Amino acid sequence: MLEDTQNNQYVVLARKYRPQTFDDLLGQDALVQTLTNAIKNNRLHHAYILTGIRGVGKTTTARIIAKALNCIGPDAHDGPTTKPCGVCENCRAISEGRHIDVLELDAASRTGVDDIREILDGVRYKPTNARYKVYIIDEVHMLSKSAFNALLKTLEEPPSHVKFIFATTEIRKVPVTVLSRCQRFDLQRLTVDTLFNHFKNIVAKEGLSAEDEALTMIAKAADGSCRDGLSLLDQAISLSSGTITADVVKNMIGLADRNQTFSLFQDLINGKTDAVLTNIKEQYKNGANPTTLLQDLINITHMVAKAKIVPSSLTDDNLSEAEKNLCQSLSSSVSIAILSKIWQMLIKGMSELALAPVQIDALEMILIRVAYSASLPTPFELLNDVKKNSSLTPIVEKKNESLAAAPVFRRRDDVDTPSTSQNPSFVSFASPEEMAQYFEAHRKMLLSYAIKNDIAIQEFADGFIKMTISDKISNDFILNFHKELETATGKNWKIETLRGQMGQTIAAKEHEKEEENKRSISEYPLVKAILAEFKGSKIDILTRIKQIEEEEGVESSDESETFFDEDI
């Protein structure tokens, strides 16, 4: 624990309670275990790179490593230690940032090759007071390309008395040539539980008190960063009079009252637009930030959807009782389709909010749209209405005519010309459509496409085809077509080709039948009403038939299928 005793000045919590040993590091068990074993077994790497979000302890870890390498302890021991004492001159100088052999470079302000040359000039000299000369380069990704190149050779083969420790929040910006020369550690984002316990211990050490709900809010707002959380805790202590309360934290970071936000979400689900607007107005008057409020609604949407799909997630200790009650009440009554729709609209609303001149007005418009959309029937419900109010038999008959089931390719030994010498894997085609689907099923996509789009077949029999071909068809294609037919059927086919005016292709026939089905379905009164309501909507025959099939013969329906392609 650091204190400025010389001037008796206040030290912020992030510095005052900065970890001083490996045991003090929060949430980095893998890193601590690896470095501890490396020190014990004398397998120290010459260069380390630490990466992670801001405030998880990258620079702090670098200093602890420097202390572990150079600590001499009260007994003046000879080698590195896993438990730096913190009281010897080396440990104290490193903690205070004044050790002559432990050099910290801020790459954000010293990015040039000349700055790196200064380092390289000092590398060849042995340390003055320490065991190792340690170079800590923070935000190393900010170095220029020339600076990285100048560092490479020394970084690969440094003198035995030199260690490099790099820290960065942008690991992808570090050249691979540098990464390959370093031992990499990814510092983990801290969990809410870890931060909550840490903050609770600090509050107790400071002789203060805090409500658990307040500390939980701070831990969540920290978003995995200990430093961010401690800065918020510092601010909360200054605003409080001895006890940090949840109300103080809410007002401080612009959090809306969670119960009000839960009520707002339920009003959105139920399409109560007037209640939504009243709720927003009240929360905004009490200091809620529109962006934070929208983020809360996004998080609630995810929480409810997760609870619906994975009910065991409600046992998570990070969830409050109010959150659990909300998930339990909504997960059984709200479909994933509705939650997905709300999620997409809220996510899109984030970008709209950032561009809006008045954020509260933009938030109201976003939530009006969400509430109105939530009250509309889902595509699946529309399909059920069509089924209840209209006869589906004509639709199913159309489907049977235009979109037959995938063909069963008959083996030659099932045909009326059996032969014991024939290969049982040979097939027989009853129609050109069956032939095209066979080649498509066997991944002969170019051949299948040509049969459907570039050929008009006049006559078709077992072993004989007469067809008109487009100008796109070459002689090589005809030879390949003949070969594939022979391979599939075991017969020598006769192919007659004509060039000239193309007749109707298989693709043209399929398109004509689909358009006919669309025209037929669009005549249903309910469909007409839907098309009139949803301007710009289009009927998708294939999707419709799939849903009808599911309703008629499959165990469950897929709510992800759409009844109409909406252009809203």
Image: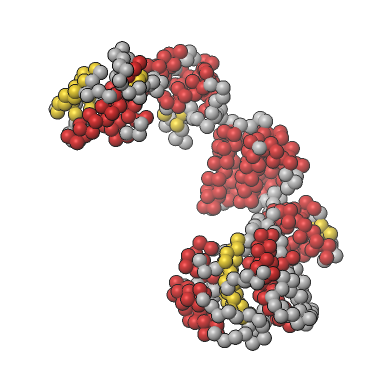
Q: Residue at x 19, y 36 (%)?
A: 476
Q: Residue at x 60, y 36 (%)?
A: 339
Horizontal side, residue 103 vs residue 235: left or right: left
Quadrant for the N terminus, please: bottom right
In depth, the one of 113 and 533 nearer the eye is 113
Q: Is residue 241 visible?
A: no
Q: Residue at x 65, y 63 (%)?
A: 34
Q: Is residue 82 visible?
A: yes
Q: Position of residue 25 (x, y in %)?
A: 71, 64
Q: Residue at x 54, y 85 (%)?
A: 124
In depth, the one of 125 and 54 nearer the eye is 125
Question: Which residue, as the protein is rendered here, is positioned at the far front?
Answer: 421
Horizontal side, residue 117 vs residue 280: left or right: left
Q: Position of residue 179 (x, y in %)?
A: 51, 66
Display colour scheme: secondary structure
Asked where in the image residue 347 lies, by quadrant, the reply is top right
Q: Position of residue 225 (x, y in %)?
A: 66, 60
Q: Looking at the picture, does residue 121 appear above or below residue 300?
A: below
Q: Position of residue 170 (x, y in %)?
A: 54, 63
Total labels: the figure holds 0
Asked where in the image residue 429 lies, by quadrant, the reply is top left
Horizontal side, residue 101 vs residue 84: left or right: left
